[in-house]
Image: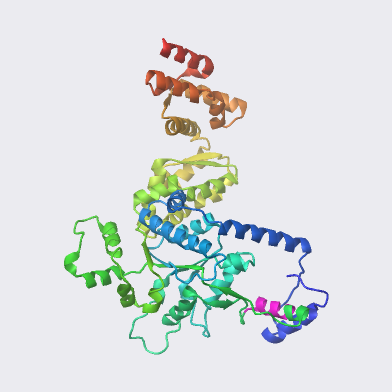
Amino acid sequence: MAFDKRFNPEELRQFIQNKYGPGVQVEVFPKTQQDQTDETDETAHRRKEALQFDYKPSQIAEYLDRYVIQQDDAKKVLATAICDHYHHIQSCRGQEDCRDYKKQNIILIGPTGVGKTYLIQNIARLIGVPFVKADATKYSETGYVGGDVEDLVRELVHQAGGDVRLAECGIVYLDEVDKIATAMNIMGRDVSGHGVQRGLLKLMEETEVPLRSPTDIASQMQVFMEFQSKGKVEKKTISTKHILFIVSGAFTGLTEIIKKRLGSKQIGFMGAGKSIEEEHFWVQKAKSVDFIDYGFEAEFIGRLPVVVHCNALTVEDLFKILKYSEGSLLKQYKRDFLAYSIDVYFTDEGMRAIAEEAAAEQTGARGLMTVCERVFREYKYQLPDHEVKEFIVGREMIKGPDGKLRELLDKPAMYHSKILQFQLGKVEQEFSDKYGINLKFTPEATKLITERAEKTGKDLLIYCADLFKDYEHGLKLLRKTSGKNQFVIDKEVVLDPAGTLERWIKEAYR
């Protein structure tokens, strides 16, 4: 923080140690004018982008599809509520009267590891607003031991780089909120259940939160420095009027409350294997009274009008997360091994085996990390000290990692030929996905391509891209004129790709 010439670091040190004890060490590093200018420019740019909200619900849902597998209903509801909220903020700018709108705070229901937090994180990243996530269990009613819920709002300012206006458009995400539901017959004052609910009430509606916490050392330092430089202390606050609050939890037992209210005869799913659909069916019928019976105050649940349910993940869902999500965990493991110049390739069978093991953990997508760590921990420890430069992850490796590791250490190049075929398979898949053209490499062509790629020192995929650079348009023309969409890449094609393509086109027209 910048300060003027009258500032005395020794006075600040004395002030802090008198207040918090001699054990507190204080170091003061003044910021340069350039530092302050850079921060101002950055936060102003972030605010401008965040407040220029021009998304449609379908665009937000499409963006979430890139990262979160399944949860289609949740994506639609969240995207619509987010658009309503930020379009309202835009319409309120420059207007005095904006009191008719009721904020669409959200309650997210779903078991652990289904992507609740990930959904909200990606939404905040897309629209460029500050995001704060915390667990409800760490807070208590103001004035008691535990975190103060107002700290959530102050943290938004920190995430916004000190820009209060940007922070006032942020998102506060409170997880495990079902843990602060309390039985109605509790004896004495409940400061961590109903007490926290009461503390959150005013935040979720509209209030002014002091930016400086009386229990925070850094805040007290700012107060001291401001008084030193200006002779007075300005009381700064942040409004929660446009801050979106999203709470989430597993809400175990909620469906039983809903069934009891509706009557057992209304059970819509009686067949085996319908548990996920059944859970979704009942949560869709949740009403405020069900949450009140669960242990929430009516005023608290009344400020969370949007209810969203995320389904549990199946083995197929977990497989798709690994294979298709842009945030796939496997990218992290590829980077881990590449740090030691080791290439790792994941087959569909290997990914499905990981998904099966993760499903058995019953922790949703978090189980993927558990399985991968269990399988690859010893690989990451031992392979950097050996000659292994590449390997393929198949089902056998997931089911018996120790045996495959010993085999790999004994034969460092055991996967080399399979990896070359694996890479050529990617070329075939790319042509199929992009152009609707099926390529098939013969064994002779595969051998010749790999030999030439190794001789030139090029990556196999890059070598193929150069070799067949004219084939995209040529094969599309062939498909159009002859209706043929399957082509065999043999040794002759590799030796003379341009000449072969020209001959194919002439034959097609003839």
Residue 344 visible, this orientation: yes
* Residue found at the far bottom of this picture: 188
* Residue found at the far right of this picture: 5
Above or below for 335 versus 435: below
Locate residue 170: give its quadrant: bottom right
* Residue found at the far left of this picture: 265
Above or below for 46 versus 140: above
Residue at image location 26% in from the left, 70% down from the top:
258
Residue at image location 58% in from the left, 70% down from the top:
155
Q: Is residue 29 left or right of residue 443?
A: right
Task: Name the residue nearer the viewer: 491 or 146.
Answer: 146
Q: Residue 72: say if magenta.
A: no
Task: Name the residue nearer the viewer: 469 or 340.
Answer: 469
Above or below for 51 versus 264: above
Task: Name the residue nearer the viewer: 355 or 160.
Answer: 160
Secondary structure mostly seen in magenta is helix
What span is in magenta? 216-225
Residue at image location 48% in from the left, 72% down from the top:
99
Q: Position of residue 51 (x, y in %)?
A: 56, 59
Q: Position of residue 443 (x, y in %)?
A: 44, 23
Q: Position of residue 63 (x, y in %)?
A: 47, 50
Image quadrant containing the N terminus:
bottom right
Q: Residue 220: say if magenta.
A: yes
Residue at image location 51% in from the left, 68% down from the top:
243
Image quadrant containing the C terminus:
top left
Colour scheme shown? rainbow
Q: Position of residue 490 (x, y in %)?
A: 46, 19
Total numbered labels placed on residues in the image: 0
Residue 425 visible, this orientation: no
Task: Name the residue nearer the viewer: 226 or 275.
Answer: 226
